[in-house]
Amino acid sequence: MQGFPRARNLEYADPRYPCMNQRFVSEILPPPELPGDSPCFLFRGNRLAVRRLEAGAAVPRAAELDLARLAPLRRQYLGRADGLPCFSFELNQLEPAGLELAELRGLWGALPEEEFWLAGRAFQIMDWDRTHQFCGRCGTPTQPKAEERAKLCPACGHFSFPRVAPAIIVAVVREGKILLARARRFPTTMYSVIAGFVDPGESLEECAHREVREEVGVAIRALSYFGSQPWPFPHSLMVAFTAEHAGGEIAIDDKEIMDAGWYSPDRLPRIPDRISVARRLIDWFVEVHGQTAAGR
Ligand SMILES: [Zn+2]
């Protein structure tokens, strides 16, 4: 444990973590009116309607839209951003005039960052609504619950809530080097920290130990909470940890991992972009261990 850096505490309004949106308040009961400057999150399939600007993009405001003509299949109330009610809408076939339909993940960096994360929230609620129109147990059409974001089956009483799949992500450090792996699912030659979904019945800590053992065959210790991040692609919650190497040499599992190694701060491979908590873990490692390496 000697000299092992502790993860920094996260402040709720830390500008480095814009998904922690202090200006948004989740609400269930929609207001009677939709003000003209309310942001509207329109989805067709998994794509979001945005207005392209000279630099970047913007989510359209209610006054810009002819919602009667667009005739959305469903709409979902999200809550208020800066006091303005926000809705998501599920479109059928019509293209919203003057807008472009774009994959949400590709809009990072184009939309204002708080709007991007709000769109992620809108997507998850829209997606849950459209995939839970019928009871998963008996097939009866579901009804929204009045004061909770939940759906109730009037026939059998089964409840459903928006889906959130927790996943762990862990930065393992050994003698000033970080464990990075190249997963088969990555589109490029990118390397990142180890991540994986939590199994039913498993704690976050157990999951972190298991994933690192399964994917690269090493044991860890001194697991320490780092932070969390909603990951709306499609409905994960990433829970990030730091840990120390406790034993074992890298032995990759050929199913999910193609390559893995220990990397010093000044010799990193290609790493994820700044959207993800994975990158923030790696940045933390460089911040803490880069100085140590430079000081030697
Ligand atoms: Zn039912």
Image: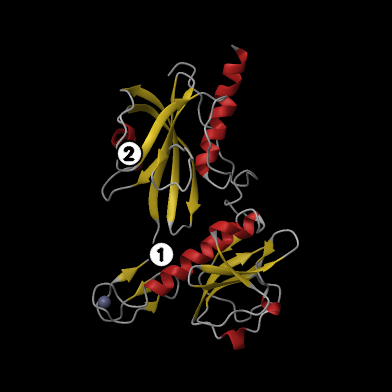
Q: Position of residue 138 (x, y in %)?
A: 23, 77
Note whether residue 148 is visible: no
Disc number lying in front (1 or 2) = 2
Q: Which mark is residue 211?
A: 2
Kind of residue at badge 2: Glu
For the question of whether residue 229 can be seen, the reply is: yes
- Quadrant field for ligand 1: bottom left
Residue 222 position in % (x across, y down): 39, 27
SS at mark 1 in the image? loop
**Mark 2 Cα-neighbour bin, 10 Å: few <14, some 14–19, many ≥20:** many
**Residue 141 against residue 158 in the figure, above or below:** below
Discs 1, 2 touching: Cβ within 8 Å: no
**249 and 241: which one is in front?**
249
How many numbered discs, if any? 2
Whole-percent x, y for residue 151 in the image:
37, 73
Helix, strand or loop for disc 2:
helix
As drawn, 213 above or below 1 = below
Residue at 42% across, 74% down: 130
Q: What's under tag 1, amino acid-wise?
A: Pro
Q: Which quadrant: the N terminus? A: top left
**In the displayed structure, does residue 127 sit left or right of residue 287?**
left
